[in-house]
Amino acid sequence: MDKKNIDWASLNFTYIPTDYRYVSVYRDGAWDEGALITDPNVSINECAGALQYAQTCFEGLKVYTTSDGRIVAFRPDLNAQRMIVTAERLLMPPVSQERFLDALTKLVRANLAYVPPFGSGATLYIRPFLIGSGPIIGVAPSPEYTFRMFCSPVGPYFKDGIKPLRLQVSSYDRAAPKGTGHIKAGLNYAMSLFAGNEAKKNGFSENVFLDAATNTFVEETGGANFIFVTKDGTVVTPKSPSILPSITRRSLMYVAKELLGMKTEERPIPLKEISSFTEGGLCGTAAVISPIGSITTQEGEIFLPSGMEEMGPVTRMLYETLTGIQMGTIGAPEGWLYPIA
């Protein structure tokens, strides 16, 4: 199939509608067969559960053209599993892993002309989401749900190159103990917007959210997990029941331990320990790793030894290994690349 006439190298990380999207509706206790449609607009009742009570969740993943011309998704089974956990926590009917992967395959095959070529620096971003689309006036689960999945070709998250970020420790809480911090609910991201805007007004790229119970342990940002590197080269990541289990972070920790032979730890990380780390990064689908240059606390600004100009050596090694796996230039662990075309 011929590609669309798109200047792939000039793409930003923004939404571009494609020809098809997948939609399936849950009503009367069952999902319908699902179908590909061309209309990008969603029509729901004004009293829909998603609009009234934030009964909505989403996922995000990418599809790549590998060096040998295959079209693959990166670990979509984990996105499907995480969406099931999220749906169950929000009293929404889960979308099975089988249906999720079937929708992904149909969507990408229908939009192959939008999959950026290998070496272009661009990828196809996939956004599955599940909403309470039926009307409900009392505080209760919606009587009907809609699952949709759309895609958009996107450029690199950092168009001008990867530069270390300045972060601040937020004075706001991201997620309550025993709350919803561990799921990918839309309400979590709405809650982070005000704090994120405050950070940007103060000249920072993002927040560092601490645990809400004690305000002493590092958890995550509004939309990414953390990794840090100790002086002895150990890769550490925060552990907390309020942290969203990032697929990118889990993959990076596996790469560090199993492929690069590094020591790894997942444990609570006190804020006061930050000054002893040599490198740090934010982990997420969009950028893989965003290096940290400094973190500003109430006591002052902590500069990581890796500096404010480029990634540290360990962070770069992790980044290059994982992106090499995604692009097919490095052999992938079994099951990590889901074949589509």
Image (cartoon, rainbow, N blue to C red):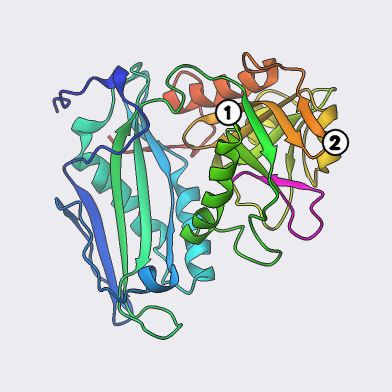
Q: Which residues are magenta?
A: 210-222
Foreground residue among 310 and 325? 310
* Residue 327 in view: yes
Q: Position of residue 134 (x, y in %)?
A: 30, 76
Magenta stretch: helix, strand or loop mostly: loop
Dot 1 surroundings within 10 Å: few (below 14), some, or many (20 or more)?
many
Badge number at residue 290: 1
- 107 versus 49 height, above or below: above
Front position in the image: 228 or 204 = 204
Residue at figure coordinates x 46%, y 34% from the top left: 286
Q: Is residue 162 above or below residue 97?
A: above
Could you tell me which residue is drawn at 16 percent across and 54 percent down?
37
Q: Is residue 259 above or below residue 129?
A: above
Q: Which residue was labeled with disc 2?
A: 273
The reply, left or right, for residue 5 in relation to residue 288 is left
The residue type indicated by label 1 comes to Ser
Q: Earlier in the sequence, mark 1 or mark 2?
A: 2
User: Counting other residues with Cα less than 10 Å from the Cα at mark 2, is it few (<14), some (14-19), or many (20 or more)?
Assistant: few
Where residue 294 appears, as percent x and y from the top left, is 71, 27
Q: Is residue 219 magenta?
A: yes
Q: On residue 41, which mark appears?
A: none
Inspect the image, locate mark 2, and give the three-letter code of the amino acid beneath it. Answer: Glu
- Please tell me whether mark 1 sits on a helix, a strand or a loop: strand
